[in-house]
Image (cartoon, grey):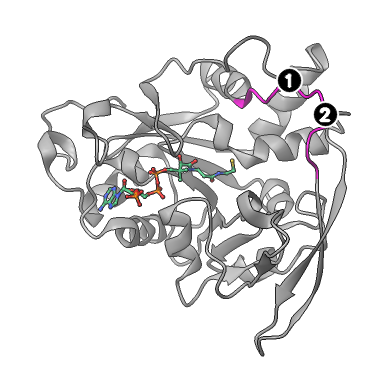
């Protein structure tokens, strides 16, 4: 699926990426009408997109069609621990990138309620998924488990497996001992402006945790042919389903209970494309010089 650098594909040769190019790339990758799709993304990695994040959201919705459901993380964990933080489901921005924020801001989007791990969704399953949860972001009722249990698909758009939240879900589902529930008490803003208590449960790692290496399982799945991989613009996109992830995670930890943990000084290097570091995060790209804003 490697793109020829001088093909007329948009994003190549400095051309801006347009909606039709993105839709075509998503369909070539394997995104299907009717999918339940959770997306983790980096806008920069795509190269310059005509219309910015809105165009990417339009492309995802077009590829999914009216029967498909798009889910994005709108997590707020970077600031949720701040004593002044108040979760406002209507106004609190996603802290998971411009594409997730563009999804959240669509009028038809539904957002779940959680101090740190809310999601936003658009499509026929959006209401069910966004309102399924209790206090935990990870248990059987949670929106993310809904995606997992319905064999949803995960799209990594220019980001590594380190950003695939479903890996964390697998750790919780497998009952790995270093992840234990922790209750946080915060506040939530109501539509009338008042605030009410909001109890949320997370599963942070216990002290002494070696750090996560989710790329390890991702690379294993790629080597086993369980991940569809290809370009979306300049981004390396990876598409996998929850069923395969569940089975692969069970297999990994059966042989090595520390399989999700970093085993050396660095996480596993992905073999396909370039994974490059920036101050904001990691980008998986065909060509590092074509990411938006690259020097
Ligand atoms: C942190 C992260 C979002 C940073 O990625 P990013 O591409 O640098 O940032 P965004 O996706 O927010 O996109 C905004 C950037 O796109 C670029 N951009 C702006 N307009 C653009 C356009 N028209 N076309 C392409 N890129 C554009 C800019 O560099 C902008 O950054 P700036 O606002 O600082 O100028 C990404 O690395 C990441 O981690 N994504 C996954 C998040 C997630 O789902 N986490 C799950 C739990 S770990």
The circle on residue 210 is 1
Residue 251 vertical position relative to residue 192 in the rendered view, above or below: above
- Location of the N terminus by quadrant is top left
- x, y (%) of residue 174? 83, 32
Q: Which residues are magenta?
A: 203-214
The residue located at (61%, 48%) in the rendering is: 152
Viewer-nearest residue: 24 or 265: 265
The residue located at (73%, 40%) in the rendering is: 169
Residue 232 vertical position relative to residue 161 in the rendered view, above or below: below
The residue located at (89%, 29%) in the rendering is: 177
The circle on residue 207 is 2
- x, y (%) of residue 154? 55, 42
The kind of secondary structure element at disc 1 is loop
Q: Is residue 117 left or right of residue 122?
A: right
Q: Is residue 287 visible?
A: no
- x, y (%) of residue 271? 44, 15
**Residue at the top extreme?**
264
- Location of the C terminus by quadrant is top left
The kind of secondary structure element at disc 2 is loop
Task: Find the distance from the CA under tag 1 to the CA under tag 2.
Answer: 9 Å
Viewer-nearest residue: 125 or 218: 218
Residue 252 vertical position relative to residue 177 in the rendered view, above or below: above
The residue located at (53%, 59%) in the rendering is: 94
């Amino acid at each position: 699926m490697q793109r020829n650098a001088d093909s007329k594909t948009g994003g190549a040769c400095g051309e801006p990426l347009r909606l039709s190019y993105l839709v075509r790339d998503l369909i070539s990758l394997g995104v299907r009408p009717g999918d339940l799709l959770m997306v983790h993304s980096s806008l920069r990695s795509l190269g310059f997109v005509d219309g910015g994040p809105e165009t990417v959201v339009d492309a995802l919705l077009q590829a999914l069609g009216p029967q498909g459901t798009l889910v994005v993380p709108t997590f707020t964990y970077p600031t949720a621990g701040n004593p002044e933080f108040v979760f406002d489901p209507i106004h609190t921005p996603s802290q998971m990138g411009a594409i997730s924020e563009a999804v959240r801001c669509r009028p038809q989007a539904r957002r779940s309620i959680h101090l740190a791990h809310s999601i936003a969704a658009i499509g026929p399953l959006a209401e069910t998924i966004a309102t399924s949860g209790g206090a935990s972001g990870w248990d059987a009722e949670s929106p993310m488990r809904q995606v997992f249990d319905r064999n949803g698909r995960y799209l990594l758009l220019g980001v590594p497996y380190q950003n695939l939240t479903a890996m964390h879900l697998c750790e919780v589902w497998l009952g790995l001992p270093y992840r234990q529930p922790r209750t946080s008490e915060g506040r939530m803003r109501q539509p009338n402006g008042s605030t009410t208590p909001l109890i949320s449960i997370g599963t942070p790692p216990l002290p002494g945790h070696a750090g996560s290496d989710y790329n390890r399982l991702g690379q294993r799945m790629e080597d086993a042919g369980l991940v569809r991989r290809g370009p979306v613009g300049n981004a390396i996109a990876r598409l996998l389903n929850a069923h395969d992830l569940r089975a692969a995670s069970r297999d990994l930890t059966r042989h090595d209970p520390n399989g999700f943990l970093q085993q050396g000084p660095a996480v596993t290097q992905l073999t396909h494309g370039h994974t490059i570091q920036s101050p904001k995060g990691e980008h998986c790209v065909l060509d590092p010089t074509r990411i938006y804003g690259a020097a």
